Image (tube, rainbow, N blue to C red):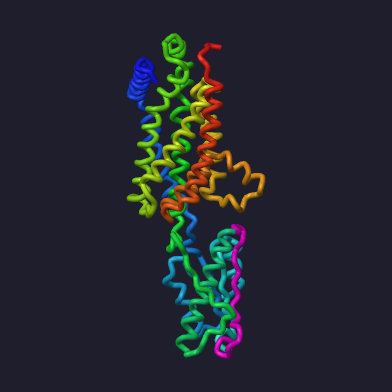
Amino acid sequence: MNHQARMRLRGMVRKEWLQILRDPSSIAIAFLMPVLLLFLFGYGVSLDAKDIPLGFVIDSPDSNTASFRASFDHSDFFRPQDFASIQTAQQSLAQRRIDGIVWLRGNFSSLLLSGQEAPIAVRVNAVDANQARITEGYIQGAWLAWLGRYAHQQGRELPLPVVMEQRVWFNAALISRHYLVPGLVAIIMTLTGSLLTALVVAREWERGTMEALMVTPLNMKEMLVGKLIPYFILGMGGMLFTVALAVWQFDVPFRGSFTALFGASALFMLVALALGLLISIVSRNQFVAGQVAIIITFLPAFILSGFIFDIHSMPEPIQVVTHVVPARYLVSILQSLFLAGDVWPVYWANMGGMLILLVVLTAVVRRKAYKRLD
């Protein structure tokens, strides 16, 4: 780039900074919107099951049933309630006042002491199948834990066909927020990055200033680069602010390197800005550009990026479609960087996917952007 080209580019960047200062909506998109979204989803979305309302029906109360019932009292996962009969408990289950029933039948203790299978029945409301599976698993875990303590107190060996030793890696406490917040950073970057540039060219067309730019010595490449640089800096500033909130406000551990985080975020921000720029060039209207940016970036990123729904559980055609969703790659990278550290095979594979998208989008933008008024 020669001296005159650098001067033109510097002037274009300065013009965009002045435009941003005159209209601070871009600053709000870069910094205020991430804070609102992070607090809204960070505190509002949780996959943890706590305080599950659980009904207990005990036909013949004694010390064993009382001990088993008490093991649920101090758990964060359950909110136990007692019912006099299985009929009243079933009525509450049908009315969704409780999510499950644990029924200890009359001969519970006698079968337990005889070493046979104790007559414990569990009924779970499966209207929400995911919640039902979680409740069932929690009850089974509480039952096995109590059986182990009971066998130890009796000096017996618990006869289990298989003894499973669990090792939970990277998120030992199984806190869903630690899994969701890194993905949420990627979703926020998708929305802010595309919105920042979705309006820039459309704004020039709406205000009639595009004609003035057309008669300047700037070529289209210098014009687009000059528009991208200020919004890239704004977007990266918003990313750093969001990551800082994730670490200090939501206590999500960050075990990777800052260099890897910055490199992946910078590449993704270029993809998001290029996508927003393409929307802006095609639509030429700020309202339409904003609506299109939300529809084709935020919604696919939310549903198809692996942020909440596991991609490998989706039908195969949908899994193929997820490869054109840029957030899919950054979600995977950020979840690894935050919870596991620098996992280079995951990192470079997803960086390659983002790089391909950037090359394709840049080629399309270059083809669609031309210095003509038609």
Residue 105, percent from left and from top: 59, 81
Q: Relative to 64, is 310 above or below?
A: above
Q: In which quadrant of the rendered view does residue 91 lie?
A: bottom right
Where does the magenta region start and end? 111-129
Q: Is residue 109 visible?
A: yes
Residue placed most toward the observer, 344 or 134: 344
Residue 354, percent from left and from top: 51, 39
Q: Is residue 15 visible?
A: no
Report whether 120 appears left or right of 176: right
Q: In which quadrant of the rendered view does residue 235 lie?
A: top left
Quadrant location of the C terminus? top right
Residue 276, percent from left and from top: 49, 29
Residue placed most toward the observer, 187 or 328: 328
Q: Relative to 169, is 367 above or below?
A: above
Residue 221 within the magenta-colored segment of the rendering: no
Quadrant location of the N terminus? top left
Q: In which quadrant of the rendered view does residue 200 lie?
A: top left
**What residue do we see at 53% from left, 44% from top?**
328
Residue placed most toward the observer, 258 or 345: 345
**What residue do we see at 48% from left, 59% from top?**
48
Residue 242, percent from left and from top: 37, 43
Report whether 153 appears left or right of 251: right
**What residue do we see at 42% from left, 11% from top?**
217
Residue placed most toward the observer, 80 or 224: 224
Q: Residue furthest top?
A: 215
How many numbered discs sit on the rendered protein?
0
Q: Residue furthest front?
A: 2
Report whether 19 appears left or right of 129: left
Q: Relative to 40, is 8 above or below?
A: above
Q: Relative to 226, is 374 above or below?
A: above
